[in-house]
Amino acid sequence: MPSIHSVLGRLPEPMRRSLADAVYPEMLPEGETAPEWHLQGHDGEWHRFQRMRWTLLVFYPGDDTPGCTAQLQDVQHHVEQLRGLKCNVYGVNPAEGERHAAFAEKYGFTFPLLTDRGASVSRQFRCTVPFPMKRVLRSVYLVNPERKIRLANRGAPSVEAIVRSIQALQQATRDGM
């Protein structure tokens, strides 16, 4: 019996796009207030949104997979620059802390990987697809210190571009725009 991925892979691109649009939830819009969350990191500490700080939430499907590893390595490459911009960085998916800890240690990630048990926070941020199974969609949210969503992106946007966005938004705030 063929897998759902092999069947979907044979569909013409317009049909795949139409199916994805019907199944994938719309992301929370920029300008909307981000949902509250409180999750435990692979380090055993509990994390939540902090006022006076920017927050970068990177929702990813799985630990130690090629796409997720590459995305989080890009984040790690820029983590000190993000911290210098007063931005907290978090990876989020439903895996347990031990698995996150092994993944973080293997690749030297210095930002928390958060355990989203039952994908409840992922659902609040519209980063799950229920079909064919509950799955976290690769998604990135940038939230400003007032808890407003400033960037919502499906996939793995360049972290360098996110850094530039934070810099521009911080400058606009200083300039009263």
Image (spheres, grey):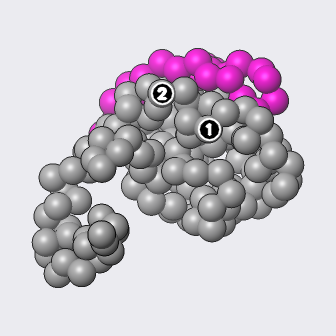
In the picture, the disc for residue 95 is 1
Name the quadrant containing residue 98: top right
The residue depicted at 56 percent of the width and 55 percent of the height is 162
Image side of residue 4 versus residue 153, left or right: left
Q: Is residue 28 above or below residue 81?
A: above
Q: Quadrant of residue 71?
A: bottom right
Residue drawn at the location 82% of the way across and 57% of the way down = 107
Seen at 73% across and 41% down, the residue is 99
Mark 1: which amino acid?
Ala
The residue beneath circle 2 is: 118
The picture places residue 155, in percent across and down from the top left corner, at: 45, 59
**Chain part drawn in magenta:** 29-52
Instruction: Where is residue 16? Give x, y as percent.
Output: 20, 70
Q: Is residue 36 magenta?
A: yes
In which quadrant will I find the N terminus?
bottom left
Q: In x, y percent, where is residue 20?
A: 23, 59
Q: Residue at x 55, y 30 (%)?
A: 116
- Residue 93 shows in the view: yes
Disc sitting over residue 120 in the figure: none
Q: Amino acid at mark 2?
A: Gly
